[in-house]
């Protein structure tokens, strides 16, 4: 079969566009599959003609919570939790749970890393810092799922809230700097490549 592809102008990580929009996602899939029955070629690269319907910001959306200066990560997680529970009650699913720890335990683990300690990994066979990588993914998912609990914010609104306004986001940014300065290669890799998304590194000029 000659190469053929459908180009869509959606954000990275959203190959079908807007989440929870089955009709739109079906339209994208059918447009891609229809390329397989085209007779012309040998190579087909076609543009999908529509933008993600969630590309526009939801002006009615408000941040789940922003604590005043001086609050702790544990206090912020407790304040975000009701919005998270609302979101998973609506969808019936969550991506939180990579480490198997409760969110309170996740907070303790992340705080320990931020303080320069290396607690025992929650995952058998994984180093402390790899365990932290999964804990960081869990807390990011916790916050972003909470952000989706009210209204229909687009992903840019949600990630800007997380990285710009939350204690969790600022904690992970601080840990990133710590890991970048480490003399351990595994810590450098996580700090440089996986902890803070590249688009946020560029946007915030980290």
Image (spheres, rainbow, N blue to C red):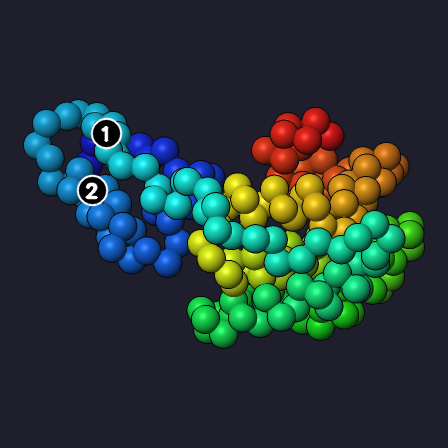
Q: Position of residue 87 (x, y in %)?
A: 52, 67
User: Where's the C terminus, which quadrant?
Assistant: top right
Q: Position of residue 3 (x, y in %)?
A: 25, 31
Residue at the image position 23 percent from the left and 29 percent from the top? 46
Give the camera-side residue of 110 and 165. 165
Left or right of residue 149: residue 173: right
Pointers 2 and 1 in contact (C-beta within 8 Å): yes
Q: Is residue 190 visible?
A: yes
Where, by quadrant of the figure, is residue 144 drawn? Answer: bottom right
Q: Position of residue 175 (x, y in %)?
A: 81, 45
Q: Residue furthest left?
A: 39
Secondary structure under tag 2 reads helix
* Crowd rating for badge 2 (residues with CA inside 10 Å; few <14, some 14–19, many 20+): some
Q: Is residue 168 above or below residue 4?
A: below
Residue at the image position 86 percent from the left and 34 percent from the top? 181
Q: Which mark is residue 27?
A: none
Q: Earlier in the sequence, mark 2 or mark 1?
A: 2
- The residue to which callout 1 is attached is 46
Secondary structure under tag 1 reads strand
Q: Position of residue 19 (x, y in %)?
A: 39, 54
- The residue to which callout 2 is attached is 31
Q: Is residue 157 above or below residue 131?
A: above
Residue at the image position 46 percent from the left and 42 percent from the top? 57
Residue at the image position 20 percent from the left and 42 percent from the top? 31
The Cα atoms of the two marked residues, 2 and 1, are separated by: 9 Å
Q: Is residue 29 above or below residue 41?
A: below
Where, by quadrant of the figure, is residue 91 drawn? Answer: bottom left
User: Where's the N terminus, which quadrant?
Assistant: top left
Give the camera-side residue of 105 and 33. 105
Give the camera-side residue of 67 and 52. 67
């Amino acid at each position: 079969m000659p190469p053929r592809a459908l180009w869509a102008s959606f954000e990275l990580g959203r190959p079908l566009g807007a989440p929870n929009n089955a009709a739109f996602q079906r339209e994208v899939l059918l447009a891609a599959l229809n390329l397989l029955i085209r007779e012309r070629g040998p190579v087909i690269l076609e543009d999908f003609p529509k933008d993600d319907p969630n590309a526009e910001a939801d002006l009615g959306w408000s941040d789940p919570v922003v604590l005043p200066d001086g609050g702790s990560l544990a206090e912020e997680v407790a304040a975000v939790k009701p919005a998270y529970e609302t979101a998973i009650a609506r969808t019936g699913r969550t991506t939180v749970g990579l480490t198997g720890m409760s969110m309170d335990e996740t907070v303790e683990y992340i705080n320990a890393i931020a303080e320069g300690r290396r607690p025992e990994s929650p995952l058998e066979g994984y180093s402390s810092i790899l365990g932290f990588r999964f804990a960081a993914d869990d807390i990011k998912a916790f916050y972003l799922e909470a952000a989706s609990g009210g209204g229909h914010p687009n992903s840019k609104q949600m990630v800007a809230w997380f990285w710009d306004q939350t204690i969790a986001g600022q904690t992970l940014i601080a840990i990133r700097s710590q890991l970048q300065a480490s003399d351990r290669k595994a810590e450098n890799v996580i700090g440089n490549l996986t902890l803070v998304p590249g688009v946020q590194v560029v946007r915030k000029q980290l």
